């Protein structure tokens, strides 16, 4: 069977099965990053070490770890 809209069909199938990644589309990670920066400030190294990941990326990682119980 040839489907004219395979992406839509695949997305509907994932939604009906309950993929946790669909829930991440409703999360505003920028707001979470701002709030976490206000709560826990991150130290900046003056010695020229490798820069840390941006806060928004770290929030993404932590949410995905929690969704997949890693």
Image: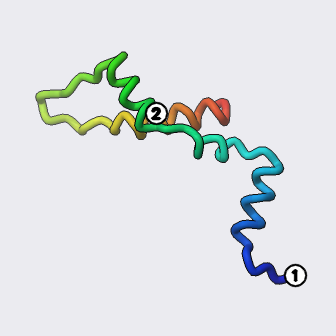
Q: Nearer the viewer, residue 53 or 55?
A: 55
Q: Which residue: 61% across, 30% down?
A: 66
Q: Quadrant of residue 27?
A: top right
- Count of labels in the image: 2
Per the rendering, the mark at residue 59 is 2
Q: In which quarter of the image is residue 63?
A: top right
Q: Nearer the viewer, residue 70 or 5?
A: 5
Q: Mark 1 points at which residue?
A: 1
Whole-number angstrom distance, CA of label 2 to CA of label 1: 41 Å
Query: Where is residue 28 drawn, in percent x and y?
Result: 49, 38
Q: Residue furthest bottom?
A: 2
Query: Where is residue 57 drawn, in percent x and y?
Result: 42, 40
The quadrant of the image that shows the N terminus is bottom right
Q: Which residue lies furthest to the right in this view?
A: 1
Check the image and report above or below for 44 versus 1: above
Query: Where is residue 69 drawn, in percent x and y?
Result: 66, 30
Q: What element carries label 2?
A: helix
Give the left or right position of residue 18, taking residue 63 as reference: right
Check the image and report above or below for 14 versus 23: below
Give the left or right position of residue 5, taking residue 31 as reference: right
| Label 1: few (<14), some (14–19) or many (≥20) C-alpha neighbours in 10 Å | few
Query: Where is residue 25 drawn, in percent x and y?
Result: 58, 46
Reading the chain from its start, which is encountered first: label 2 or label 1? 1
């Amino acid at each position: 069977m040839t489907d004219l809209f395979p992406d839509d069909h695949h997305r509907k199938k994932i939604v009906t099965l309950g993929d946790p990644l669909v829930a991440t589309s409703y999360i505003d990670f920028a707001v979470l990053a701002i709030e976490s920066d206000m709560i826990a400030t991150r130290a900046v190294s003056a010695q020229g070490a490798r820069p840390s990941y941006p806060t928004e990326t770290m929030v993404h990682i932590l949410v995905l770890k929690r969704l997949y119980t890693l």
